[in-house]
Image (spheres, helix red, strand yellow):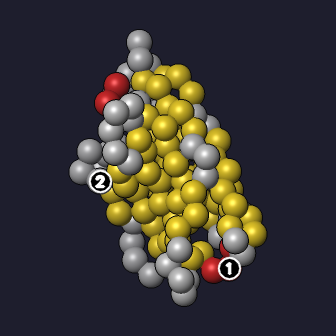
Amino acid sequence: QVQLVESGGGLVQPGGSLRLSCVASGDVSSIYAMSWYRQAPGEERELVASISSTTGPYFSDSVKGRFTISRDDDKNTVSLQMNSLIPEDTAVYYCNARVQPSHMDYWGKGTLVTVSS
């Protein structure tokens, strides 16, 4: 079992920045990939960024060049630095951890990001 807790959401003006963090606890040694997803009202949940122990970071086209993802295994955290935010980035952002060998997914409860003037 893995537990995930996100933090760092809030209200920001267009063009601003936010940093989301996710702390993992429990069976953290089984985690091989951590990701950030988001879900806007009325939309499906979508993958935003991902980082694993074997591959480089992945970013969706909609955030490439604006968002960066980092992982600190010593602190069991994954962070999402979001720059040049636009209203379309407004969503609930969820932390995800995928474990081996089951490839089971664990989710945090989400943190709301609102980009508005």
**Quadrant of the snapshot with the C terminus:** top left
* Residue 34 % position (x, y): 52, 65
Q: Can residue 84 be seen here?
A: no
* Residue 90 % position (x, y): 41, 30
Question: Is 65 positioned to the left or the right of 23 in the image?
Answer: left
Q: Nearer the viewer, residue 41 or 67?
A: 41
Dot 1: what SS? Answer: helix
Residue in the picture at 39% in, 72% down: 56
Give the residue at mark 1.
29
* Residue 3 % position (x, y): 69, 61
Residue in the picture at 26% in, 45% down: 62
Residue in the picture at 57% in, 27% down: 10
Residue in the picture at 49% in, 38% down: 92
Asked if 10 appears above or below 82 in the picture, the reply is above
Question: Is 87 positioned to the left or the right of 95 in the image?
Answer: left
Question: Which of pointers 2 and 1 lies earlier in the amino acid sequence?
Answer: 1
Asked if 109 appears above or below 87 in the picture, the reply is below
Q: Nearer the viewer, residue 69 or 22?
A: 22
Residue furthest toward the right? Answer: 26
Give the residue at mark 2.
60
Asked if 97 appears above or below 87 in the picture, the reply is below
Q: Residues within 10 Å of mark 2 (few under 14, many from 20)?
A: few
Q: Residues within 10 Å of mark 1 (few under 14, many from 20)?
A: few
Q: Quadrant of residue 66?
A: top left
